[in-house]
Image (tube, helix red, strand yellow):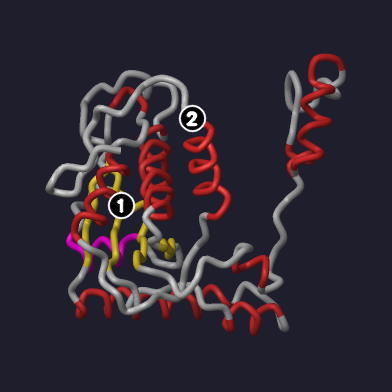
Amino acid sequence: MTVPADGLPTSNFPTGSFTEEEQRGLYRAIYTRRDIRTFKNDPIPADVLARIIRAAHHGPSVGFMQPWDFIMVQNTDIRQKIKELFDRERQAASSFFDEPRRSHYLSLKLEGILESAVNVCVTCDPTRAEVVLGRNSIQETDLYSTCCAVQNLWLAARAEGVGVGWVSILKQPQLRQILGIPHHVIPVAYLCLGYPIEFPPEPVLKTAGWRDRLGLENLMHFDGWEEGSGDGMWEEFRSVLAETD
């Protein structure tokens, strides 16, 4: 990767096939990405943070609409308000669980709002273009596109050794008010970024006994939801999938 003085990668990457080393690097980022909640006190250098955000901006979007904006949150007072909002919503959410699951839920660390180096709120502006190629039939493609930017951000952060935690226990109207987000703009993801204490070998919620990863073989369908058993041309695929799951 060519990195100029300002720390941003240039766009002159080769467009052909990946080398085996590059392939392994991509899959490593995917399979070792984690939802991080505990962070070191180390700041993220400006060039590293810029590379991560630029990678998010290069996410795919339907009709090339690019509906995202990135609100970088460093101010302690603002983060404290976000933390208080989280605490209220977490208590409210706990009422949906019976004991002992309620106590288990409340024991989980589900955010790093104050401890992380920086918070990033990724938003979706559905009015970025009056007519978007490909959005007429599925209006929500602007939200889906924004989530692609979030995934790019997450994988780029993992490649840089930076952890990301998605804080979803936040009510949108209150979050919009705290951050001064216009009424037509949708806050999609509130993210905590920082150098982690560790990248755990397994997802934290799996290790904590909250939920296991679903078996991929039970999520596969062939030629329709109820149609086909995956025999014939899919037999080898299913066999390989079972070996590598």
Q: Residue furthest top?
A: 233
Tell me if mark 1 has few (under 14), some (14-19) or many (20+) residues whose alpha carbon lies within 10 angstroms of its own: many
Residue 85 found in image quarter: bottom left
- Residue 122 — which label? 1
- Image coords of residue 3 (percent x, y): 22, 42
Overall secondary structure of the magenta section? helix
Q: Which residues are magenta?
A: 172-180
* Residue 24, position as x, y percentages in the image: 54, 40
Mark 2 and mark 1 lie on one chain; the one further toward the N terminus is 2
Q: Nearer the viewer, mark 2 or mark 1?
A: 2
Taking the magenta stretch, the answer to whether it contains residue 177 is: yes
Find the distance from the CA under tag 2 to the CA under tag 1: 32 Å
Q: Residues within 10 Å of mark 2 (few under 14, many from 20)?
A: few
Instruction: Give the residue at x 18% y 52%.
Output: 182
Which residue is pictured at 35% across the width and 30% down the height? 61
- In magenta stretch: residue 97: no
Image quarter where the C terminus lies is top right
